[in-house]
Structures are given as C-alpha cells and as structure tokens.
Image: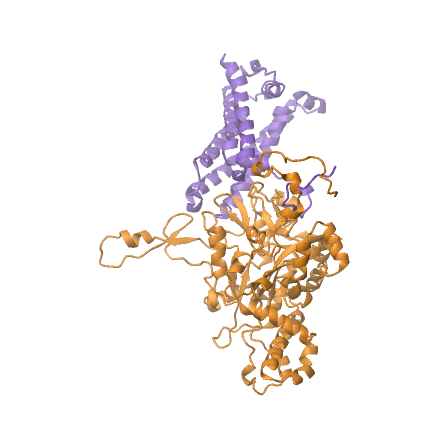
C-alpha cells in the first residue's frame, strides 16, 4: 500500500501543487515573480558560486533527461553499451553534481555571512538552498559513491519507465518497490522540492528567457488595450 | 514613413543653480520606499566629477549602449546569446557601492537617551542592513560643488579623456551642474538588453517604461543603459526607472522635476520622428556624425506631408499642434542650441542640454569698451574647456559646441545692444554671420530662454485616451478592465477605420 502512496499519490500531489501554484502565482502574484538576485550586494563570491551552481544544475538536468526520459532501447539502438553509458553517467553526472554542491555551499556561506544579503534572506530562500543541497547531495552520492562501491544500479529499467509512466497516467508503481533506498529517497525529496518551487525563489526557473534571441531588439507597446479590432 | 510622437525635454544648463529641488521632489514622488532608497530617477551632478553612479560614463567598464562594429549596430555588452550565457553572473553590472549604501540617522536616540554627561548623537544607520555605519564615505552628491576637489575630479571619465590638464587651483577651477533623468531614447539599449521584454517604449509618447509584471530581474538593463538610469530594486527584485511622470504628462502637466525647478531650466514638448529612420541614424560610422544623423530623424511638424502621415499614424490634432509649438523642437532642431547627452552611445537620447555659457567668460572685464565682435574670441576662452563640453554633448566635436556658444553669445550681445544702445553696430557685426543667425531668431530665442512662461515652457498635450480609442466600443468596460474581455459592441460602430 505504501508503494501506491509514494510512487503514485505523492508524485501526483506534489506535481499538482507545483502546477496549480505556478498558475496562481502567474495570474495573481506576478509582481513577485523574478530571479531575486543579490548581485548588487556582492559580486566576488557570486561570480564563482552562481555559474558553478547554475551550469552544474543545467548539466544535471540534461543528465536526468538522458537517464529518465530517453528509454534504454534508444541507447541500444545507437549501439551505446551499458558500460559506456554508466562511465559517461558517473563522470558527467558526478562532475555536474560536484559543481552543484560546490556552488550551493559557496552561495549558502555567502548568504549567511554577508550582512547585506543575510538580513534580506527569507526562510524560503534558506529552505530552497537546503532542499537543493539534500537532493543534489543524495544524487551525487549515488552517482559517484554508490554506483562505484555498492552496485552500478541500472535505473533505466526501473526508475526511468516508472517516471515516464507518470506522464501517461498509468503509473507502474511496482517498478519502484525494489529500487535501492537511497534512490527512493532522492526521488521523494526531489518531488517535495518540485512542490515548493512556486513558493520560493526557484520560480525563476520557469521564466528562463529562451525567446530573447528571436525577438526584435526594440519593443513598442501601445497604452491602449481597447483599440477597436478591424473586422 | 512611420511617424511617431515623442515627449522630450530640454534643460538649459546656464540657468541650473544646482539646488537639487528636482531630485528631492522626484524622490518624494517616486522612490522613497524600501528597495528604492538609492534610486535617483533625477539627480544633479557637479561636473567635472564622477557623477552617479561613480564614473557611469566609463563605458569600457560597464559596457552600456551600442557600438557600430563590422557594419552592424550591436549592444556593447553583447547580444542576446552572450547575455543568456552570462545570465548567472553579469560581470559588468555595477554594485551598490558604485552608488552608495543608503543610510538614515538614529534620531530616536536623541529623544530616548538617558541623561548623560555628553550630548547624545544620532548615529548613521544603514538602510540596507539596519546596522550602524561608522562613517559614511560616499553618498549622493558627496562631491557636490567640487567638494571632493582634486581627489574626486579625476574620477570623471571625461576629464581622463581631456588633453588639457585641469587645474584645481581655486582661481582656475570651473564647474557646472548636470541634472540628469532617463533620456527616453529613440533607440534605447535598456529595452534591447531586457531578456524578458519587460522594458518597452510607449507608442503614444515614446516614454520608456518597465512592465513590473513582466520584469524577471535579470538586471542587464542596469548596465545596458549607458546613462545608468535603470535601477534594480533589492526589495521587489525588479527594475525601476524614471517614467517621465507619465500620470502627470498624460494630464498635460509637466514632470515633477520640471514643475518644481527653481531656475526654470526645463522645457517639455513633443517632437515628431520617423521610426523607420532610427536604426539607420544610429548606425553612422563616425560618432561625431551621430548628432546630425539624429537630427535627421525628426520631421517638420509644419510640413503638410508630415502632418498627413502623422494623422494616418493616429496622432491627433492636439498633438500635431503641440509639436508645432514645441519648445524642444525649436531649441534642439530648429535653432540647434540644445544638444544630446553623449550621442556616441548611439541610443538617440531625447533629453537635450543647452550648454552653459557661464561661468562668465574669462575676459569680460572690459565690457564697457568691448566692440561687438570682441565677443567672438571670448567664446573660445570660456572657463569651461570646450573639449569638456564636447566630450559630454557632441562626441568630442568642439565645432558643434562653439556654434551653440556663439549663438548664445550673439543672443546676449543683441539683447545688450537693444537695451543700452548699439543696434546699428550689432547689425553690421560679424557675430550674426558667424553664429549663423538673425535678429528675429535671437529675439525668439531670448523670449524662450529668458522670459518664457509656464505655458510656453511646457507644451504638453494630454494623453489621448479619448481620441485614440473608440469610446463607444469601450462603454461599460472600464470598471473591470483587467479581468473581463472588452465589452461593448463587437462590430464596427460605423466610424470606419
């Protein structure tokens, strides 16, 4: 029964909180939606910490797409052996994980020690940093230590299909029952983190300005919202 | 031709007394709240001096504005792709200390301090951290009236460019005031720098605004604006800037900085320009040609063709009429005595400055005997080096400055001749020819610069809500503007468009 809770109910509830929360904040609290930068207050440590963390998490994100979204069959079709895949995952993922952790620690120390930043840091700011540290810490531990010392776990036949099955609304929770505990904990913590996104600074992830390069440099806007439409 | 209207400003620097009333009223209107303490939508700088933020004109450091490279106009800090690559850390962004740490004083202590041997003091207290500051070391107008002396003046990037050594001995120094607001440029680089598209130029009056909903706090506007007039609010984490007091201008009133200006140095008016020509005008190779090329985008509001095109573009009669009476059009375009600030940034700024003729020319001790043409060489011996003004207002072209100063001198000499006699001599003199002017123009200039009343200085047509939109179509819609779809009739009301 607890399998159904953790691998069906919990993911859907957290994702629902995230989606509804995002829509709510977009519709009613958009004036608070931003990337709350503290660069104005401190630049030296941000220069190291922020790019480390952000690029690390972008690599990690790409790695999760490779592991969770792309089915194992695709790798087999491309002729990538399991060994080759795992070496790539351990080195690439490990590096990304270390970048994320190093960046987070620098940013956390910065947040705690520099007066101008600390006095304006809120509970949710610290919550986000610690939640990210926990999730990425477990992820990095799994990638670098668990994978090399305990067992090189083949998550592409269990966690991957389960994750994809969430989006077809036919969750195959049985796949998750035998997964090692540290992987389970990582996933649960990650979904809890997803649920918190609309209520923290992490919301800026959803406003990555990817359309910027394709728009006209100069923007004109008319004040009038009520110009008569031509018929 | 794509005619647009722009509300613009001219500041006549000769009349600025550096009283900071504009800054104070602006601050009290717009930025006296947490997160905005360090924002000065309007500030007055003593020049030579580093300005606000410190050394803002150092474009090599902050990389603001545009450059013309390989036949293309591009943002100096890099285009969209490089911005996205630098989005996690913007190397060129100024820090709070480039502005200052805003502070207040612990006034409470003055009242509640127990009886002591020494008089209680109000210690300075940071408005960012709430902690006491031992000793504030920089603040707004810290260097007012050259008070920083020879330690601070060399921080001015314009001074660093000067060939001539600037003397800081008391008898030989010079200074002038430079009030600054957002330039509401025709080719704003802050707008182009915004990854979210939150900054925009308003169609109706060309005012550049930040959409507080859409801003995501990426901060590229902060250094993308070469004038450093977009600020980051550390409280709301969004950008804010001078909005040309649009709630006032829409009602036909001047901005609060203009309204309260003690010296009455400010003029507001409408100019018509061709939006299709803007990019081309900003893309001339030689920076010294930018001033003339900027002038070429403006359209003569009396030209019937222009009027027709303006009407087609939805600009109504009252705006066209305002453009015809515009003091800005006269000073900047017709008489060419108002100049754009740092045209070399290629943003086509729309707040113009009449360079100061005072502090009075060096050699004016013998005015009693001076012949009219004797004033001509005096123009070249102004206490403020012409190169300095040129570095501010004409990309280093001293000829442009000289022409303006000659015209302003001719105006004074003409006025003097008219009041104390000597018009005959004046009419024959070289100064009219050299200043490329005539007595009617000088007369008109004198009126606008010297005696113009409120209604002449501020020719501001009201917002055109009532003309631009179809009121009939809108009926019943306004109360729930943001929530409901536009109500009213969904078919044409027969006006034909």
The residue positioned farthest toward the top in the image shown: A1
Residue B129, position in %: x, y? Answer: 40, 47
Quadrant of the image occupied by residue B301: bottom right
Position of A228 with respect to A32 (left or right) is right
Chain that is coloured purple in the picture: A
Task: Work out which quarter of the rendered image holds the C terminus of chain B and state it.
Answer: top right
Q: Position of residue B292 (x, y in %)?
A: 70, 64
The front one of A7 and B12 is B12
Q: Is residue B231 left or right of residue A67?
A: left
Q: Nearer the viewer, residue B359 or A215?
A: B359
Residue A86 vs B372, above or below: the answer is above
Q: Percent from the top left, x then y, of residue A216?
A: 69, 45
In this view, which residue lies farthest toward the right? B305
x and y, in percent, of residue A132 in the image: 50, 32
Relative to the observer, which residue lies in front, A100 or B355?
B355
Q: Exactly how many numbered labels are in the figure?
A: 0
Residue B129 visible, this angle: yes
């Amino acid at each position: 029964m607890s399998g159904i809770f953790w691998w069906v109910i919990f993911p859907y509830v957290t994702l629902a909180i995230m989606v509804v929360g995002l829509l709510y904040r977009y519709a009613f609290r958009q004036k608070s939606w931003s990337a709350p930068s503290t660069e104005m207050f401190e630049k030296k440590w941000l220069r190291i910490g922020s790019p480390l963390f952000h690029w690390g998490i972008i690599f990690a994100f790409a790695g999760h797409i490779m592991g969770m979204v792309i089915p194992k069959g695709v790798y087999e079709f491309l002729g990538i052996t399991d060994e080759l895949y795992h070496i790539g995952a351990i080195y690439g993922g490990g590096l990304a994980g270390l970048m994320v952790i190093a960046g987070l620690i620098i940013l956390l120390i910065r947040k705690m020690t520099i007066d101008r930043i600390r006095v304006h840091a809120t509970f949710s700011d610290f919550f986000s940093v610690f939640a990210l540290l926990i999730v990425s810490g477990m992820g990095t531990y799994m990638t670098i230590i668990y994978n090399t010392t305990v067992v090189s776990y083949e998550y592409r036949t269990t966690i991957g299909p389960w994750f994809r099955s969430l989006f077809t609304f036919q969750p195959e929770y049985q796949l998750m029952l035998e997964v090692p505990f540290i992987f389970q904990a990582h996933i649960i913590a990650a979904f809890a983190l997803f649920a918190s996104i609309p209520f923290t600074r992490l919301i800026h992830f959803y406003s990555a300005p990817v359309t910027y390069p394709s728009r006209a440099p100069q923007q004109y806007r008319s004040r009038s919202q009520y110009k008569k439409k031509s018929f | 031709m794509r005619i647009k209207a722009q509300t613009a400003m001219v500041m006549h620097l000769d009349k600025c007394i550096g009283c900071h009333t504009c800054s104070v009223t602006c601050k009290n209107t717009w930025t006296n709240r947490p997160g905005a303490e360090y924002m000065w939508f309007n500030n007055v700088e003593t020049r030579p001096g580093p300005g606000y933020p410190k050394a803002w004109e150092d474009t090599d450091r902050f990389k603001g504005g545009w450059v013309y490279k390989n036949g293309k106009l591009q943002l100096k800090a890099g285009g969209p792709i490089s911005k996205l690559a630098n989005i996690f850390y913007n190397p060129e962004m100024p820090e709070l200390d480039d502005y200052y740490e805003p502070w207040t004083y612990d006034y409470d202590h003055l009242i509640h301090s127990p009886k002591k041997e020494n008089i209680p003091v109000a210690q300075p207290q940071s408005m960012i951290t709430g902690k006491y500051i031992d000793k504030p070391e920089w603040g707004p107008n810290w260097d007012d009236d050259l008070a920083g002396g020879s330690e601070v003046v060399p921080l001015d990037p314009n001074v660093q460019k000067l060939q001539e050594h600037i003397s800081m001995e008391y008898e030989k120094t010079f200074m002038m005031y430079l009030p600054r607001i957002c330039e509401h440029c025709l080719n704003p680089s802050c707008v182009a720098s915004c990854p979210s598209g939150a900054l925009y130029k308003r169609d109706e009056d060309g005012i550049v605004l930040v959409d507080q909903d859409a801003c995501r706090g990426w901060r590229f506007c902060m250094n993308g604006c070469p004038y450093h007039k977009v600020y980051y609010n550390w409280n709301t984490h969004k950008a804010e800037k001078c909005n040309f007091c649009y709630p006032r201008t829409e009602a036909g009133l001047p901005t609060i900085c203009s309204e309260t200006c003690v010296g009455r140095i400010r003029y507001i008016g409408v100019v018509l320009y061709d939006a299709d020509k803007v990019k081309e005008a900003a893309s001339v190779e030689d920076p010294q040609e930018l001033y003339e090329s900027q002038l070429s985008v403006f359209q003569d509001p009396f030209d019937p063709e222009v009027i027709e095109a303006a009407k087609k573009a939805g600009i109504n009669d009252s705006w066209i009429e305002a453009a015809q009476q515009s003091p800005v059009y006269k000073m900047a375009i017709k008489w060419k005595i108002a100049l754009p600030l740092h045209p070399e940034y290629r943003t086509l700024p729309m707040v113009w400055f009449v360079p100061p003729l005072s502090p009075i020319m060096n050699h004016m001790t013998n005015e009693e005997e001076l012949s009219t043409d004797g004033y001509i060489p005096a123009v070249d011996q102004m206490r403020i080096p012409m190169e300095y003004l040129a570095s501010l207002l004409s990309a280093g072209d001293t000829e442009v400055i000289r022409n303006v100063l000659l015209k302003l001198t001719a105006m004074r000499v003409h006025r003097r001749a008219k009041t104390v006699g000597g018009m005959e001599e004046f009419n024959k003199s070289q100064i009219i020819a050299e200043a490329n002017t005539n007595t009617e123009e000088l007369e008109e200039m004198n009126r606008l610069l010297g005696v113009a009343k409120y209604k002449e200085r501020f020719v501001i047509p009201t917002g055109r809500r009532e003309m631009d939109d179809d009121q009939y179509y809108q009926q019943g819609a306004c109360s729930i503007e943001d929530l409901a779809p536009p109500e009213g009739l969904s078919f044409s009301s027969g006006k034909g468009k």
